[in-house]
């Protein structure tokens, strides 16, 4: 339940920023404004971070913590070498 809440929060922020960016693009289409262009660039950067965080969280939920994955992979490697 907690994990889905994290993804929901990320998704909610993505939606809000996407809406804000759409409005800014509309304003930018009406006239050139360097401040609006800079804000769009900042929003794009934040959206990239959020999409990365969402992918990482989904992967963590599906496959487990990174440390555990590495531990399992090393154990499997040892078993293969021993066989």
Image: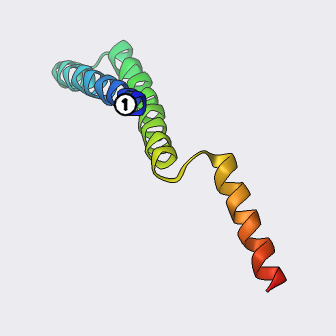
Instruction: Quarter of the image for the N terminus: give it.
Output: top left
Q: How crowded is the residue under tag 1: few (<14 C-alpha within 10 Å), some, or many (20+)?
A: few
Q: Is residue 58 left or right of residue 20?
A: right
**Left or right of 44 in this view: 73:** right
In the image, residue 72 sits, relative to residue 36, either above or below, namely below
Q: Position of residue 14 (x, y in %)?
A: 32, 28
Q: Which x, y percent locates residue 59?
A: 48, 49
Q: At 21% across and 23% down in the image, what residue appears?
A: 19
Q: Is residue 83 left or right of residue 58?
A: right
Q: Is residue 78 above or below residue 54?
A: below
Give the quadrant of the C terminus: bottom right
Q: Nearer the viewer, residue 3 or 44?
A: 3
In the image, what residue occupies the spot 31% across and 15% down?
33
Residue that lies at the very extreme toward the top in this rendered image: 35
Q: Position of residue 46 (x, y in %)?
A: 44, 27
Between 43 and 15, the one nearer to me in the picture: 15
Residue 6 placement: quadrant: top left
| Residue at image coords 73%, 56% | 71
Q: Position of residue 37 (x, y in %)?
A: 36, 22
Name the residue beneath numbered marker 1: 1
Q: Secondary structure at mark 1?
A: loop
Q: Residue furthest right?
A: 82
Kindly indicate the quadrant of the structure image that contains residue 65. top right
């Amino acid at each position: 339940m907690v994990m889905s809440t994290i993804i929901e929060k990320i998704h909610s922020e993505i939606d809000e920023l996407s809406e804000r960016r759409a409005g800014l693009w509309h304003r930018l289409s009406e006239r050139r404004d360097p401040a609006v262009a800079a804000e769009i660039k900042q929003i794009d950067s934040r959206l990239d971070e959020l999409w990365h965080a969402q992918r990482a969280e989904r992967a963590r939920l599906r496959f487990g913590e990174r440390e555990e994955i590495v531990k399992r992979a090393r154990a499997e490697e040892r078993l293969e070498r021993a066989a």
